[in-house]
Image (spheres, rainbow, N blue to C red):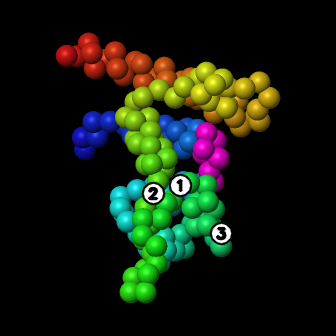
Amino acid sequence: MKPPPNDYLKFWRVIRYYMKMKHGLSQADLDVILFLYSEGYFSKDKFDEYAQIVSWSKDRFKDLHRDGWIETFRRRSFNGKALYQLSYKATRMVLDIYRKLNGEEIPTSLAANPMFHKNVSYSDKVYRNMIILMNQHCKEQRLKKRGGD
């Protein structure tokens, strides 16, 4: 069996941890946002349909809306449901995830990555070590591609 051209999932856990940390999201919140990314406009019913398979939180929709991840596209009217869409902020985050999966490096500066501060948890220290290894791998992959051209 021929392997896929890119090994997208090799560093998925590291990228996911970084995104959750950077944006203050839970795993369930991130999963819901990733699902909704391709939905375009959606109703609260569609949101609830997918949210059933992630850890339960009665306030998830309200919190994501309040925090600017979801925005109202059309308010509820006499003859129609309210429609929502992911915000520009959410869309940018998902595109950033795709860029990281495609080999863009995760920043290691204090300003751009909270895991590189001094007083962080042990988990953050372990993940930042993996970020350094991942970035190194991405550089090597880019060099191989350039050398093969």
Along the polypeptide, which appears first: circle 2 or circle 3?
A: 3
User: Is residue 17 in view?
Assistant: no
Q: Which residues are magenta?
A: 20-26
| On screen, residue 34 above or below 81 | above
Left or right of 7: which side holds 52?
Answer: right
What numbered label is drawn on residue 59?
3
Q: Secondary structure at mark 1?
A: loop
Tag 1 and tag 2, C-beta contact below 8 Å: yes
**Which part of the image, by quadrant, shows the N terminus?**
top left
Residue hosting label 2: 86
Left or right of 118: which side holds 70?
Answer: left
Q: Where residue 56 sits in the image (x, y, percent)?
A: 64, 70
Q: Where residue 39 sits in the image (x, y, percent)?
A: 36, 63
What numbered label is drawn on residue 130?
none
What amino acid type is highlighted by mark number 2?
Answer: Leu
What numbered label is drawn on residue 69?
1
Q: Secondary structure at mark 2?
A: strand
